[in-house]
Image: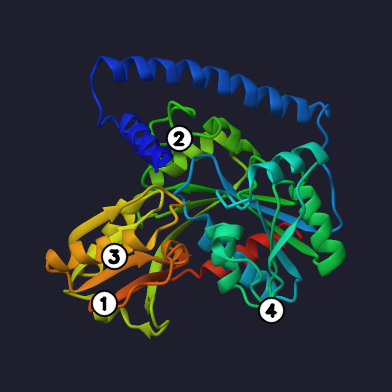
Amino acid sequence: MIRERIERYYLKVLMGRKTGFGVQVFKAFLTCSSLLYLAVIQLRFFLYRIRVFRSHSVTAWVISVGNITLGGTGKTPVVERLARLLHSRGRKVAVISRGYRRKTGPRWRRFQEKILGAPTTRIVSDGKNILLNSRVAGDEPYLLAANLEGIPVLINRNRVKAAHYAIRRLKADTIILDDGFQHLGLKRDLDIVLVDGRHPFGNRRLFPRGILREPPRNLSRADLILITKAEEGKQEELKGELRKFNRQAEILECRHNPVYLRDVRTSIKASLELIKGAKAATLAGIADPYGFERMLRELGVEVIYSRRFADHHFYTQQELIDTLNKASRRGAEILLTTEKDAVRFPRLPPGKLPVFFLRVRIDSVREEEDFGREVLRFLRRRNL
């Protein structure tokens, strides 16, 4: 919880919601740290380019899905849609993730792994059965495993080791790297980079002074750029800016469309009509909770109470009880959360207030276009 309080304070500083002399000193420190961070990452890229650091090849297609900012661009729905698409075309797909913020066990075990080398590849799903829970796997790998029938999901900080495992043990011929744009140790056939259509580069400063993981000019490495959370007819200026960094990459616009609701207690699906006009409370521990709340309002929901946690927060039962009680006192008729949050819930306590998560899918921003067809057309042009 201390880490989350620090994280929330840090985000308020980045967004300009904190003022004062101490905040200015902190910002100056972050600016100096950003310069050091820039020097380190550019040196790393240079060492890979001159082959001091080695990029490994594997005997399978390797497709990376990543971004240049910290969180919130919607990688998980894109990875899921891409994996389904390739699986339906007869490819033997495996998804590999780092498993960010998963519980990796006691400190002595983590220290032992570092001394002995890369950690062992762990199978979240073998395509038939889910073998790890969300705490051990991480919320995003677990979510992918739950939604991708017939497609294995693996976790390992060492993506090269995980790729070799997937090819040798699981006979994969297509590897999808979840959040792999900055992982240069594994050569890839295709780099897909996501850019948030509403906040493409944050405050345009590098981490830790901003949310950029690397300078926007490094988009030159991308083969396909997806503008996510796009609004039709409103991305031309952003497209023009992206073209300055990369003239060759294809640029597609897409958005996250709500599909249905699912009851967290019973797993029963429900229509979106259920929440139209409803007074609702929201609970979210994601990078962009405001975007989630905005989507609900666009569906006709009256959001009367919101509780927000840090991204990847694992909830306690007491937190859920407190949220449900506060929501009821405020007059909420329903509690709404995201699918990614729901996999981090403990067993929900019984209560009168129903709890649903919103299922979303990645689609083209233009109704006449089909996202899957557009991606397949691009892959065929790349001979993949």
Q: Nearer the viewer, mark 3 or mark 4?
A: 3
Q: Residue at x 34, y 83 (%)?
A: 270
Nearest to viewer (mark 2 / mark 4): 4
Query: Which residue occupies 23% across, 23% down?
Result: 19
Mark 1, mark 2: which one is toward the viewer? 1
Displayed quadrant of residue 358 = bottom left
The secondary structure type at the circle numbered 4 is loop
3 or 2: tag closer to the N-terminus: 2
Count residues near mark 1 (Cα–Cα under 10 Å), then give few for <14, some for 14-19, many for 20+.
few
Q: Which residue is pictured at 75% across the width and 48% down the height?
A: 119
Given residues 80 and 344, the one toward you in this image is 344
Q: Please name which of the two marks, 1 or 4, marks the residue nearer to the observer.
A: 1
Badge 3 amino acid: Ile
Disc on the earlier residue, 1 or 4 = 4
Q: Are marks 3 and 2 in contact (CB under 8 Å)?
A: no
Q: Which mark is residue 211?
A: 2
* In the foreground, 142 or 76: 142
- Mark 3 and mark 4 lie on one chain; the one further toward the N terminus is 4
Q: Quarter holding the C terminus?
A: bottom right
Crowd band around label 4 with a 10 angstrom C-alpha radius: few (<14), some (14–19), many (20+) = few
Mark 4, residue position: 128
How far from the left and from the top, in percent, is residue 53? 81, 31
Q: CA distance from mark 3 to mark 4?
A: 34 Å
Q: CA distance from mark 1 to mark 4?
A: 33 Å
Which residue is label 1 attached to? 351
Q: For residue 342, what is the image quadrant?
A: bottom left
The amino acid beneath tag 1 is: Gly
